[in-house]
Amino acid sequence: MTEEPARPGEIAQTLDRGLRLLEILAEADPDQGLSPTEAAARLGVHRSIAARLLATLLRRGFVRRTREGRYLLGMGLFTLARQVSQNLMVVAGPLLTEIAERLDATAVMHVADGDGAVTLASVEPKRASFHIGLRTGSRHPLGTAATGIAILAGRPAEAGERDKVAQGRKQGYVVTTGELVPNFTGIAAPIVVNGWCDASVGVVIPKERKHDEKVLASEVIALARNIAIGLT
């Protein structure tokens, strides 16, 4: 069952500010971080409020403080992210392997990280006749390639979005050629859980196989749906 969005009066303001502060730190220079004053300015609150939020996040290990008193993201976030990735792979891993072998195509999964899409898995068939070299952990913008665009297509519509995003939302999948790997076509579908999308799954094939698009797209859509069911 899809959950309704929380109304403004139902949001915990302090928690919301703390989460937004983590997003602000993620957008900052990873080598410099932010001072409490800079964090307060970007968050739009008094310095004392930002300082309390930072102290709380520091205690939980979600941020760290430099000798100069500046704050950066902490390892606690990576622990949480790793656990989420492990849970996702427990569900998706066997399905990716099965579809890679059956379709003789590289199966890939990407997760959203800010405004980027990160490769969580890339599974090639055992008897692969080609190797695309898509490394786990590699990153590209959400608006680039089928895997990133599919994540956007799984989210509510926004004004001014790209035609490919709208088209992907309408047909349930996205196709691009040569955006990540020259001469290869990617076909991807969003993994939508509780009305929101933070991941996509797809296959990568030589562009000469693009005539198989409709058949492969139906397989990818079904794969995305099965993964979403396994996560709920």
Image (tube, rainbow, N blue to C red):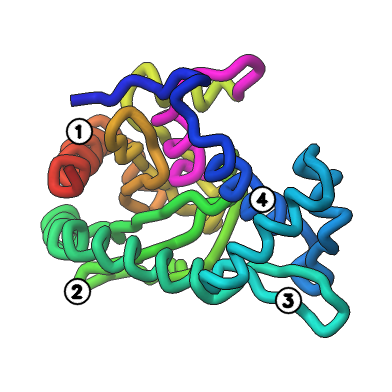
Mark 1 and mark 3 lie on one chain; the one further toward the N terminus is 3
Magenta-drawn stretch contains 156: yes
Q: Select label 4 or label 1 by which is in front.
A: 4
Q: Select label 3 or label 2 by which is in front.
A: 3
Task: Give, as a single range, the part of the protein colored magenta.
Answer: 145-161
Residue 164 in picture, x, y percent from top left: 52, 26
Q: Are marks 4 and 2 in contact (CB under 8 Å)?
A: no
Q: Residues within 10 Å of mark 2 (few under 14, many from 20)?
A: few
Q: Report the Cα–Cα distance between label 1 and label 3.
A: 49 Å
Residue 167 visible somewhere in the drawing: no
> Which residue is drawn at the image coordinates 18% and 25% (left, top)?
1
> Which residue is drawn at the image coordinates 46% and 41% (left, top)?
146
Q: Identify the residue position indicated by label 3 in the image.
A: 65
Q: Identify the residue position indicated by label 2 in the image.
A: 127
Which mark, by number, is residue 21? Answer: 4
Magenta-drawn stretch contains 22: no
> Which residue is drawn at the image coordinates 53% and 44% (left, top)?
15
Residue 227 visible somewhere in the drawing: yes
Amino acid type, callout 3: Arg
Q: Report the Cα–Cα distance between label 2 and label 1.
A: 23 Å
Q: Report the Cα–Cα distance between label 4 and label 1.
A: 40 Å
Amino acid type, callout 4: Leu
Q: Select label 2 or label 1 by which is in front.
A: 1
Residue 110 in picture, x, y percent from top left: 41, 54
Q: Residues within 10 Å of mark 1 (few under 14, many from 20)?
A: few
> Which residue is drawn at the image coordinates 66% and 17% (left, top)?
160
Q: Report the Cα–Cα distance between label 3 and label 4.
A: 14 Å
Q: Secondary structure at mark 2?
A: loop
Mark 3 and mark 2 lie on one chain; the one further toward the N terminus is 3
